[in-house]
Image (cartoon, grey):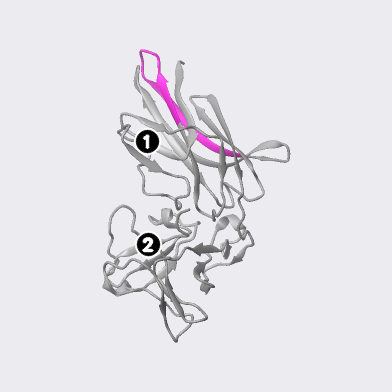
Amino acid sequence: MALSTDTFWIWKWIAIDWSTLFTIYGKMFDPNVPNAPGSYSTVSLVNESYSYSLTWFQPWLEVCVCCLEVGNETSSTISWSIQCTLQQWTWWDWEDWDTINFWYFDIDPTWWYFNYMWVWIDPDEIRPWISQYRFHWVACWQDFYKTFTVSNLSFDDVEHPAWYLWVEWNNLCYVPPSIYSGSSDTGYKHIIEYDEWYSGWSWEPWYIWIPSSSSDHHIYYVTEYGTVYRTKESYAWSWWSSSAGSNKSWYIRMTPSTSWTPEQAWYNYLCYVDGWWYKRRMGVWEV
């Protein structure tokens, strides 16, 4: 079975059709970029690298992306599978930790097929106490490997009680529930970056609120000393706006990583419904 590897890279950016560049490095979990496979004539990565500095990174920020493109060199259609597993170098050996994706499909004669997957910081992928990782792709029973290292990753990796939302110094913090902590009632603390261009004053410390304006996509809060801050701008529901209905305005929630609802891509975000009933999601923001 003749299957060739045309492209196999790791890097921070994805180039689609040679013109559109999508950044992965430092983005919040599940960024709004095209999903592979897709109807693109070319998919490539820019300037391959095997080392990533993660200074100021927090849980659920993206680290890097791996792209694999294979071609069918035969004159007949091949039915094949593809699987990508992230491996961690622990106890002097490679350990399979997270199988990112698995597909079965057909590839036509003299044609190619690509796939790309990215990894992020969380308890089952990139961890503070592990520095060496490896992508293990299995395509049509052939093994492909790419190794990379991370450095300078440090954050609060203590498991805190989940569902909490609070003001800590100048930041809004929350703890989403995570099955990876061993309990759906605990998780890592997420620190939301604040908008450095905004500040105000209030006599009511500790208040947290959502504005009523349809164009103001921030969450506001008051520190212990009366300073008013706001988060950086939140994201709309997926790639489009989605109304929750007038009876759901001002709701704030956290979707657990154990969820298999249509909101599963929103897990570990702070989600809310604004005053105009639109769903928004808020994360730690980008580096």
Residue 121: % across, % down: 55, 50
Q: 34 above or below 76?
A: below
User: Distance from label 2 to label 1 (Cα)?
Assistant: 25 Å
- Where is residue 105 shown, x and y percent of the image? 39, 30
Q: Amino acid at mark 2?
A: Ser
Instruction: Estimate the x, y position of residue 165 in percent, counting from the top left.
Output: 50, 71
Q: Which residues are magenta?
A: 68-87
Magenta stretch holds residue 77: yes
Amino acid type indicated by mark 1: Ala
Determine the residue positioned at 36% across, 15% down: 76
Tell me, yes or no, whether the highlighted magenta stretch contains residue 259. Answer: no
| SS class, disc 2 | loop
Bin the neighbour count of mark 2 within 10 Å (Cα to Cα): few under 14, some 14-19, many 20 and up.
some
The one of 229 and 274 positioned closer to us in this rendering? 229
The image quadrant of residue 40 is: top left
Q: Is residue 237 above or below residue 143?
A: below
* Left or right for 232, reference 97: left
Q: Which residue is mark 2?
A: 234
In the rendered structure, are the residues bearing label 2 and label 1 in contact, judged by CB atoms less than 8 Å apart?
no
Q: Quickly name the residue at label 1.
A: 15
Residue 138 image offset from top left, x and y in percent: 52, 29
Residue at horizontal 31 percent and vertical 52 percent from the top? 239
15 and 202: which is toward the camera: 202
Q: Residues within 10 Å of mark 1 (few under 14, many from 20)?
A: some
Is residue 37 at all visible to an observer of this figure? Answer: no
Q: Residue furthest right?
A: 91
Q: Residue at x 55, y 59 (%)?
A: 178
Give the main secondary structure, helix, strand or loop, of the magenta stretch. Answer: strand
